[in-house]
Amino acid sequence: MTALPIPEVPHLGEADTFWRGIAADELLLERCRSCSAVVWYPRGFCPSCGSGVTLEPASGEGAVYSFSVVHRGAGEYRGCEPYVVAYVELDEGPRILTNVVGCDPDSLVIGARVRVVFDHGPDGSALYRFTTV
């Protein structure tokens, strides 16, 4: 399997600090200052109550909630097959879309424990992915 490419990630508004954390090998989650809800995706406010949020380090651990093995990649992903696209349910609660890397796709199961890893591109870009533990 060829290494997965690192797509260009736009740094926009409230999510910019999140992506700077990824570039520094740190997964950050927003937490509501008022109701303490953990917020995913980064947006700068709580979707439950509208209050402001703070960023805090995540454990970087979770479990595979759902996944699909891709056998026909397109564009930059052609030739990287097979690869896994998954929703990982973080221990803090949110489910995030990601790749699971460094494992045999045929042996992956729902509920498998995973931890975050960071892939860095030659241009300084970075992306979070997960690997089995």
Image (tube, rainbow, N blue to C red):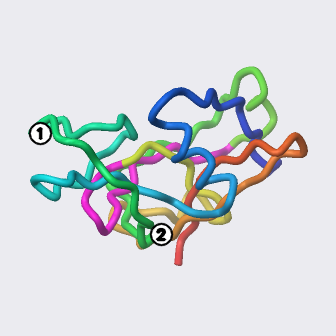
Magenta includes 83? Answer: yes
Q: Quadrant of residue 5?
A: top right
Q: Position of residue 129 (x, y in %)?
A: 59, 54
* Residue at image coords 75%, 21%: 75
- What amino acid type is highlighted by mark number 1? Ser
Which residue is nearer to you in this view: 127 or 24? 24
The residue segment tinted magenta is 82-95
What kind of secondary structure does the magenta stretch mostly adopt? Answer: strand
Which residue is nearer to you in this view: 109 or 128? 128
Q: For the residue carrying disc 1, how many other residues have a C-alpha within 10 Å: few (<14), some (14-19), or many (20+)?
A: few
* Residue at image coords 59%, 44%: 19
Nearer-N-terminus badge (1/2): 1
Q: Position of residue 20 (x, y in %)?
A: 63, 48
The image shows residue 12, relative to residue 107, as above or below, that is above
For residue 5, side relative to residue 41 (left or right): right
Q: Going by the picture, which residue comes out furthest to the right?
A: 122
Q: Which mark is residue 114?
A: 2
- What amino acid type is highlighted by mark number 2? Val
Magenta includes 128? Answer: no
Q: Quadrant of residue 56?
A: bottom left
Mark 1 and mark 2: span between their CA atoms?
28 Å
The image shows residue 2, relative to residue 10, as above or below, that is below
Q: Are marks 1 and 2 in contact (CB under 8 Å)?
A: no
How many numbered tags mark residues here?
A: 2
* Residue at image coords 28%, 65%: 92
Q: Position of residue 78 (x, y in %)?
A: 77, 29
Q: Position of residue 115 (x, y in %)?
A: 51, 70
**Which type of secondary structure does the marked residue at label 1 adopt?**
loop
Q: Going by the picture, which residue comes out furthest to the top?
A: 75
On the image, numbered disc 1 is attached to which residue? 48
